[in-house]
Amino acid sequence: MTRKQLSQYIAFSSFTIISLVVVGILFVILGFIIVRGASVISWEFITGMPEEGMTKGGILPAIVGTGCLILGSMIFAFPVGVLSGIYMNEYLSDNWFRRFIDFMTNNLAGVPSIVFGLFGMALFVNYLGFGDSIIAGSMTLGLLTLPVIIRTTEEALKSVDDSLRTGSLALGATKLQTIRKVVLPVAFPNIITGLILSIGRVSGETAPILFTVAAYFLPNLPHSIYDQVMALPYHLYVLATSGTNMEESRPMAYGTAFVLIVIVLLMNLLANFLRKALGKRVKM
Amino acid sequence: MIQAEAKNVNFYYGDFHALKDISMTFEPSSVTALIGPSGCGKSTFLRLFNRMNELIGNTRLEGLVTVDGKNIYDKDVQVDEIRKRIGMVFQKPNPFPKSIFENVAYGLRVNGINKKSILDEVVESSLKKAALWEEVKDNLKKSAMALSGGQQQRLCIARALAVEPHLLLMDEPASALDPISTAKVEDLIFELKKQYTIIIVTHNLQQAGRISDYTGFFYLGSLIEHDKTQKMFLNPADERTQSYITGRFG
Amino acid sequence: MKRFRRLFEKFIEGILLSSSTITSLTVILIVLFLFREGLGIFNRSPLEHNFIIAVSKQNPVQDLSSDQLKAIFNQDITNWSQVGGKNDSIILFTVNDITNYFTEEELGASLEYLPQKLNEFIVSHPGALMHISDKNLPSDFQGHTIHVKNISVKDFLFGKQWYPTSEPIPSFGIWPMIIGTFLVTLGALLIALPLGLATALFLAEVADIRLRNIVKPLVELLAGIPSVVYGFFGLIVIVPMVQSTFKLDVGETVLAGSLVLGIMALPTIVTIAEDALRTTPRSLKEASLALGATRWQTLRRVTIPYAKSGISAAIILGIGRAIGETMAVLMVTGNASNVPHSFLVPARTLPATIAAELGEAPYGGLHFKALFALGIVLFLFTIMINLTVAYVRNKERK
Ligand SMILES: Nc1ncnc2c1ncn2[C@@H]1O[C@H](COP(=O)(O)OP(=O)(O)OP(=O)(O)O)[C@@H](O)[C@H]1O
Ligand SMILES: [Mg+2]
């Protein structure tokens, strides 16, 4: 073996070993929680209320709460994100305005989630007077995911072949007609995929909801958008760090972590499935 | 004497049978042109000679490929050693985003030659052989990306020559160039064949006629005819060659 | 009809335009609200609203710094001469002390005589230092108020003490958090960068394409696992591990934070770096290989240099994420408010402090404002990171 082959051998072997370790660690973590969590999961756990200082019973209010927050944030962020993605990709040319919006969107994407929490508290909870409520939390989470949805929409639109646009315009269709009838149908599967992946992200965010909506414990399910709710990630945080009896609430914590992971997994599977299924329909 | 040879070669991309039982020999200091309609396997065949096809997963080779009498697919052959001895010029000029000097010196550096005096000498002689020296000798530190397309392609040829290959593979080296640059590259190939064995893929039949000694006609993965260029163009043995040359398909 | 349609298109375009301004608007609002609440901590006295420090009229001392005041209240300073006054011992007096000097009858049922008694006290105790509410001051007050030096940006950033609720003078020095954040992030990078980049190189250049197509989506999936889950894992596995490995009293340390954060950052770094490596044109790699370079040489000399700016952008973004990560770090670093001097002691980070304390800080109070000021610092970090990334990307385009 020559020197250069030897150094390649050494380098590549170490990459291989390191990758095995890295992927191994990540899956050990995932496996650890899935294995411990799965044994806790039962019908009662999913549909029951927390009992006995959250050491027994279920996590229904947290599941419902997270559901409300997902729904609320998506009702806001999805239309706004998709519309602005369309505007940025289809209407704006590469001028200062577009660069400015790009820069601001990147900035928003980089803002730490706890700062969103501060902001949501200052604007929605206090200034607008919503109080700790589903609407305050949803708006905060919605703003947090907005950049993600804008970016995926843009990516989806970028991947639409330009010849489709020129073809349609050449046939006398207006710009809006072209976007609606030609561009969007092709880009649709990827846009939906982005949406679903951002649901996964919203469901796990804790810092933005700490001071805008999340409740330590609530005996009732929410009745209106001005109610507080429990939420899965915050519930896990509470169970792990400040439950009344941490040792005894551990199984509840494993179960909650399991549910959170399952949501992310499901969203990924769903996204993949939809991308394939819808992609096929568009091709035909 | 034979410089390079393919013997009963079959090549598969997955299930797709891209090369069908091809046998062909190449003599030293000769230029062989490979012609044929798009997708017939010319590039695939050319890339067998420096084992470039291995970079694509899920391929399979049957048969024998030899260079200088040695089976280059033998188990004990180191692929980088083979590639060092076989130069390749690609369809699109692909200089590295480095200086002109470093582009030409690259092949030496990766083979452990870093002595300044040797590098200087080889860079100069390679650029001279590639007929680029006069145009760039004062700007060797300049980025290669700043050269024109034709200059870039000649730089890529100089880069390939710097490692003193025995065999030069060219895949449509002039197809991305304007007529003047093309003429320069053709002149260059004509010069180079004094020292090197050259296999060149081209879609330009006039070009094949001007610069090659031998021509091989590929069709749907098979070698239909392989003969002296003059004979092929004036009096092809196969009907399909005839139709291709007279422009009836392809 | 045609005119109507054109109007309609303009209308829709207007809607699209306004949607696309929402991100910019949000950024501006974030700045506005952070500064609105957070700047209130600066250039004002560190005393809670309405409270003052008063001394006798004969006392020549006019102003004190908060450090001096703290020392006085801790009885480290007991004589006025130590702070530039006469040689007289300091008599501390807060509202809680009032019953030590006066009976309830003397003060009145609803403390109506309190102002008057305060006057009596200050006259009879020339060495007194009073911490009282200005509502209780009599109109003919016989003392003068001490000007307490304002909280400066410098004190805030470089102050080593964070006692936001201590009475009467809280301390708002965030230096421990800045160092904590820096150490935790540094440790995380030392773990995640080599491992993540090596994995990215493996996936991009070494692994069989089929293996890559299985592993890459799985790694991407792991990037979506919520940070509380990583924090939870850290709490039950990594923290005890750190504790027993290094024989520590507590396992909640900078190191535990770095480990959890490093592991969390791995999927992101692997994904982005692998994407960046993939941008290197195939033709360049082939050119290098055709010249007899090994794949490793090609990687080092062609692929990595080409992808360099993409990889650096990934690294910088990773740093940004690490700095801003809240929950996982909060759960495993122990949140001690001392300046950490090694990786094996508890520490707290900027985001974790906000998350841990905002719930208990009274709305609009100094502590509340200080936490928003922390938010400003974090936000400025983010902007810096983004400017750097924009700069790196811009250079790449040229
Ligand atoms: N990486 C690949 N995977 C699968 N099939 C391939 C691959 N590369 C080439 N092929 C197929 O192999 C056949 C021969 O391709 P090749 O590139 O050798 O043709 P060519 O004669 O060079 O064509 P052209 O003149 O267009 O360059 C084509 O049908 C092509 O579709
Ligand atoms: Mg070809």
Image (tube, rainbow, N blue to C red):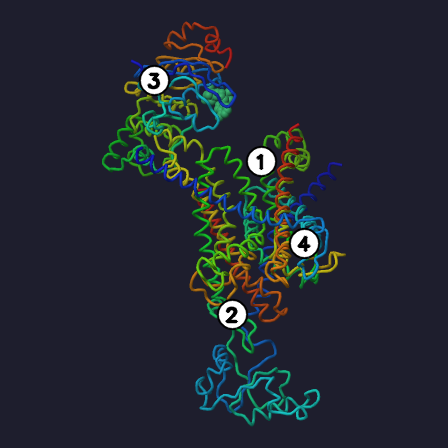
Task: Name the residue that disc number 2 marks.
Answer: C162
Q: Secondary structure at mark 1?
A: loop
Q: Earlier in the sequence, mark 4 or mark 1?
A: 4
Question: Dot 4: few (<14), some (14–19), or many (≥20) neighbours within 10 Å?
Answer: many
Q: Is residue B193 left or right of residue B202?
A: left
**Spatial separation of the CA atoms under disc 4 and disc 1:** 31 Å
Q: Chain of mark 4?
A: A
Query: Where is residue C371 drawn, in percent x and y?
Result: 56, 65
**Spatial separation of the CA atoms under disc 3 and disc 4:** 70 Å
Residue contact between numbered discs 2 and 3, judged by CB atoms under 8 Å: no
Residue A138, labelled with which disc?
4
Question: Dot 1: few (<14), some (14–19), or many (≥20) neighbours within 10 Å?
Answer: few
Residue contact between numbered discs 3 and 4, judged by CB atoms under 8 Å: no
Question: Dot 2: few (<14), some (14–19), or many (≥20) neighbours within 10 Å?
Answer: some
Q: Is residue C147 above or below residue C235?
A: below
Q: Is residue B163 left or right of residue C333?
A: left
Q: Chain of mark 2?
A: C
Task: Name the residue that disc number 3 marks.
Answer: B4
Q: Is residue C319 visible?
A: yes
Q: Secondary structure at mark 2?
A: strand
Which image quadrant: the N terminus of chain C?
top right
Same chain shared by disc 4 and disc 1: yes
Q: Nearer the viewer, residue B41 or A265?
A: A265
